[in-house]
Amino acid sequence: MKSDLTVEDSLRENRLFMHRILASVSLMLLGALILVIRLIYLQIEGHQLYSTLSRENQVKISPITPTRGMILDRNGEPLADNYVTYSLEVVPEGIQDIKALLEAISKVIHLSESELQAFRDLMAKRKPFESVPVRLELSEEDLARVAVKLPWLNGAEIRTRMMRRYPYKELTAHVVGYIARINEKELNYLDPSEYLGTFFVGKNGLEKSYETVLHGRTGHQEYEANVKGRVVRELGKKPALDGANLYLSIDIGLQKVAMEALGDYRGAVVAIDPRTGDVLALASKPSYDPNPFIQGIDKKSFDALQGDESRPLYDRATRGAYPPGSTVKPFEALAGLELLGLPPLGRIACPGYYRLPGSKHKYRDWAHSGHGATDMHRAIVQSCDVYFYELASRLGIRRLHDFMQSRFGLGVPTGIDMAGEKGGLYPSEEWKKSHKRGDWSPGDTVIAGIGQGFVTATPIQMARATAILAHKGLDVEPRLVSRIRAGYDIEPPFPKKPHADRRPIDPGQWETVVSAMVDVIQKGTAHRIAAGLDYSIAGKTGTAQVFSVAQNQSYKSMRLTQSMRDHAWFIAFAPADNPKIAVAVIAENAGHGGTVAAPMARKVMDHYLHGLPHEN
Amino acid sequence: MKIDPILQALEAQKKPRFRFLSQLPMDLPLLGGLLLLSGIAMVVLYSASGQSLDVVLRQGLRLMLALLVMVGVAMIHPRQLANMSPILYLVGALMLALVLLFGKISMGAQRWLDLGIIRFQPSELTKLSTPMMIAWFMARYTPPPAVKRLFGAALLILLPVLLIAKQPDLGTAILVGSSGAAVIFLSGISFKILAGLFVLGAGSLPLFWQFLHGYQRDRILMLLNPEADPLGRGYHIIQSKIAIGSGGFSGKGWLHGTQVHLEFLPESSTDFIFAVLAEEFGLIGCLGLLSAYAIILARCLYIVVQAKDRYSRYLAGALTLTFFVYVFVNMGMVIGILPVVGVPLPLVSYGGTSTVTLLAGFGILMSIQVHQNRQFE
């Protein structure tokens, strides 16, 4: 604005300014172009992606938890069921004075300091509109008190929850198992969408092996929620499908008899219907009460159970692998008949011991003076060891192993619908080579002949082998669950075989063995249970050595400590001519099978057969 | 000068229908653009505020107040504005210093000066006083400016900018700085010096980095990779991008933006209101808003070009460019190409002080336009 401004200067200045304005306009257009390109990139190019993200923001899913299925015995008696508990809960949002409310509540029911602390901890973790329990399980008395005072406890409410319960406690603990809180390891393999609202999972027994069908299918509710998680409106709902009810073949009455029959002994009783494989009783002693495990058993009680030398947490029926002792003899006799011809040895002389050719080692018979002239029938009835030492030697371990495994399932798990089953062991040359030092020796075969040495079997395995024998080779797979009842299609976790096949053994040969087993009760090692019998039992005793006796040393059972005494076995089926029940019993360190185990089996068979409707 | 009487006759023929309005020192096209933009803003704000009529009414009231301020400013002659510039500049700088010494701390920054009755944000004053001062300073010399003049101008710009950055209010500092820089640019600084400054600026970026606050650095880093901390520092950008992207071509519909109504989008009625528009009205809506801004900017440029004297040109041009920077920085931040600095979307974001300042700026532009044409003196 100086006065000496010439026209030329003014024009130059104008031109310069206009150029600058043009440059500015170009800059602005460039800026606008960048904005528009970016908007197109986000809104057209990225629309799909951001729509998805926006929907994820908007829609929240909350699980609808299914009710866990019940476990019932064959007559519909609940062995695991759910009951409703009433909990007192507080929704912190909208409560002006939580402290005052808690004080008011503690005037109605007594709240311990630890309960109050737990409440405060939980309240800090949850969102303000989520419910926080003050007490999870209200006693009936407290429930009544709170219910009356509820109108004055603004913000508190009574809610219901389902809790698991095992009414038969120790009686069914090993069969049913228990559920408990999901741990971190289980989180890794459980389907997270199915377990969104579930805090418990089967840890043991049927609760574990049938987890998928017991749990049911989690439903869900879709709703729109804001950034704080508050529900704005509901969008959709897929209801939960409640868990299936399991009907067991077990009869709780028979189970009780089986448990009581074991008395104070540690051991197991397994009863199977040999026509179907249905497990009628599966008892293992000692047992435990599974109920405290659900909410988390306290450490002291758990340590006591875990540290107990009698191992109450351990299911002997499906996991306990014991030397089967003489109970293998009927099966071995069948192997002889089948593989060596009829009768394989004829009559042998039993001097009370057996020697392998060219060896001085004496394999003793349980009867020191021997059984004299012994044929197969007598060998089973009297449980002559020498006969079976000889028979095993003649058969050889390879043929024995193959026969026992393929015909009677020894050495392999039965496939019972229960988690954690053990398979026992029927040894072979290959097995010894890979698991033990040294090659298979002829002596190993000799002692395998009487079910000792490396041979082990579980009670469920022996019961199944007995069942196969009872119906002359009709193969059955033991099953605890006979029916799964659900309101929808489910895939049973342990499907039954479409048809049971028969084991290829000459039909006439069964009779030889079965008649000997009938005589075991009539005049043999189990004659004590013959008295008053109104049906016929075919059985075999076993007295399995736990402790091996050195050569030239006599074996005096009474002198040995309790834990070194023999295991008492008894396997049987009845009625012998039309078997309806097959039983395997083991009583640990109980001594003689015929004396201790056989009476236990009789009690179970009596109860079962007398309870059945009479056939005409 | 023969045509003068003819022009005067033509002027006389254009008899305005509304005498009162024609008497008011106002530029009707610019006013129309501003009202159009404010109308759009009210519609979006109603949705962004969770359908609060209260918020919309309050914003409307503020707008009325700001319009009065605008008219008031427009009545001042540009020459008077030029004369006031140094005083206003000094008062602004002084108050900024006072803020740093006695100011109220809110939201972690010291921006407010409590004057007893009203609380006042001096940085708002400097948004206008700085370009006025620089325009006054540069207008005293024939362009292109000598280097020592440029140094002087640079110092005059840096004083308020540094004081504001110290509060810390990076957004306003950028706006104030760019308003001064715009004047220097328009005054014909040679492109050689400009290029040199650019290189120097780029070279001193690491040094600049050292002066940034931790959260400011985070915002820049988050721009590069917001997914690194989706729930923390990257949250704003991610949610804003989701809102915009999910709007698509035509949007989710007014009041149907889920990102907004479910409160995933933070600061939805203030700094991030553009995302609300983008979500509910889509690309179409965004282009519509950009058009409204384009109308205003076009009219401003017309005023700039029409301006007769140096001071008016510089100031009008600087205010126009700053308005654009305002829009660009806010949108750039919301769409994730610029770091999150607290710059509201002019005339759309909810908030009082910045609206008044903005309309006062438009008042200056109107003053320049009106006094140019009507020859009031």
Image: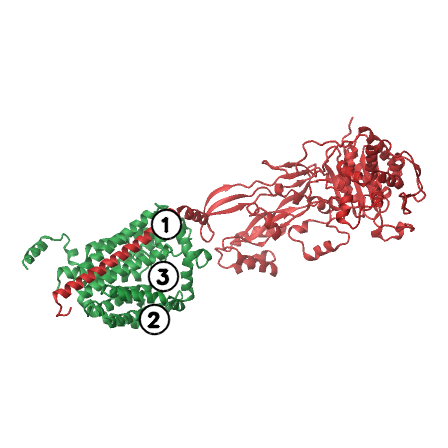
Residue A477 relative to residue A366: left or right: left
Q: Quadrant of residue B121?
A: bottom left
* Residue A294, horizontal then vertical, whole percent: 65, 50
Split into 4 quadrants, where in the image is the N terminus of chain A?
bottom left
Q: Extreme front residue here? A: A358
Q: Which chain is home to disc 1?
A: A
User: Which residue corresponds to mark 3?
Assistant: B342
The mark closer to the camera, 1 or 3, is: 1
Q: Which chain is home to disc 3?
A: B
> Disc 1 vs disc 2: Cβ atoms closer than 8 Å?
no
Q: How many marks?
A: 3
Q: Residue at x 90, y 44 (%)?
A: A358
Chosen colour scheme: by chain
The green-tinted chain is B
Label 2, residues with CA under 10 Å away: few <14, some 14-19, many ≥20: many
* Residue A275, horizontal then vertical, whole percent: 74, 32
Q: Residue at x 14, y 59 (%)?
A: B373
The mark closer to the camera, 1 or 2, is: 1
Q: Secondary structure at mark 3?
A: loop
Q: For the residue marked with disc 3, what is the amino acid?
A: Gly
Q: For the residue marked with disc 2, what is the amino acid?
A: Val
User: Which residue corresponds to mark 1?
Assistant: A41
Q: Nearer the viewer, residue A229 or A454?
A: A454
> Disc 3 vs disc 2: Cβ atoms closer than 8 Å?
no
Residue A397 relative to residue A44: left or right: right
Q: Which chain is home to disc 2?
A: B
User: Which residue corresponds to mark 2?
Assistant: B99
Q: Nearer the viewer, residue B114 or A492?
A: A492
